[in-house]
Image (cartoon, grey):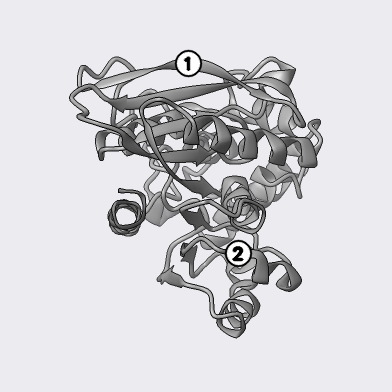
Amino acid sequence: MSQIKKEDIKQEVFDLYDDYAHSRLDRRDFVQKLSLYAVGGLTVPAIMSFLMPDYKNNIQIKADDPRLDSGYITYPSPKGGGNIKGLLSKPKDAKGKLGGIIVVHENRGLNPYIEDVGRRAALAGFISLAPDALTPLGGYPGTDDAGREMQSKRDPKEMQEDFIAAFEYLKNHKDCNGKVGVVGFCFGGGIANMMAVRVPDLAAAVPFYGSQPAAEDVPKIKAPLMLHYASLDTRITGGWPAYEAALKANGKKYQAFIYDNVNHGFHNDTTPRYDKAAAELAWSRTIDFFKENLK
């Protein structure tokens, strides 16, 4: 890991990374623009190394954690991509049926960070399913750059069906009590909002910095919402006032939090956009919300 510190990096560099991570900049343009900030010991390769996820050193709950039953399953997605792979996790000492949580990845497939989040949800007392929307193309390829490129080749509507099918699978799982919520990050936050619109019996939805649904779709939402936004994420947080106005106008149940002075992706503890205080607060609020609505 680079010896660069977060405070050494200008906000504009994080904004450039956001553009790159969401395919608004290709790699060549990203590198070229980064060169403007390569001064002193900050070389372009050093900055790029610093910005990229470090999965090796930042996983909180290991894959073989003895407190969990966790492993890969496949479930059918008849309207989507066929049979989809997902990580299914639950606490080993569970007594009785559990509330279910669908954990939706970012725009790069089921990477180690999202698998980790699925295991965290299980340790909190739920049965979780973290699907991999890249399954029809071979699954998460091992790097986020390749995963992002791969995910861009999938039909967005088919991917929506894959996550709705995950809800149906988990709701009917023998260890689930039938109450299923969804938490998603970035692309997954948009999916969480979509599921709130399209799945009438969704029990709860928690989008982290997710794109908002169209105002005309808000009346269809029945699930309570908890929404997490980053103040520096003007691209996504800028859409919140209109969404909130539509939620209020339609009498929907929601809580929303905008975390001050943090970036898009602040929950992802494998990248330097991570903000420990905001991430831990948002996650504790999320788990409390799910306990209230899924038990």
| Residue position marked by numbered label 2 in the rendering | 221
- In the image, 184 versus 147, the foreground residue is 184
| Element assignment for label 1 | strand
Is the residue 136 above or below the residue 217 in the image? above
From the viewer's perspective, tell me whether residue 234 is left or right of residue 94. Answer: right
Residue 71 position, x and y percent, is 41, 16
Query: Can you tell which quarter of the image residue 64 is in?
Result: top left
Amino acid type of the residue tagged 1 in the rendering: Tyr
| Residue at (49, 39) in percent of width and height | 102
| Residue mark closest to the camera, 2 vs 1 | 2
- In the image, 212 versus 83, the foreground residue is 83
Query: Mark 2 and 1 residues: CB-CB less than 8 Å, in contact?
Result: no
Q: Residues within 10 Å of mark 1 (few under 14, many from 20)?
A: few
Residue 66 position, x and y percent, is 21, 17
From the viewer's perspective, tell me whether residue 148 is left or right of residue 229. Answer: right
Is the residue 121 above or below the residue 10 in the image? above
| Residue at (68, 51) in percent of width and height | 19
User: Considering only order in the chain, which callout, 1 or 2, is on the residue closer to the N terminus?
Assistant: 1
- In the image, 61 versus 179, the foreground residue is 179
Residue 62 position, x and y percent, is 30, 22
| Element assignment for label 2 | loop
Can you tell which mark lies on residue 204?
none
Can you tell which mark lies on residue 72?
1
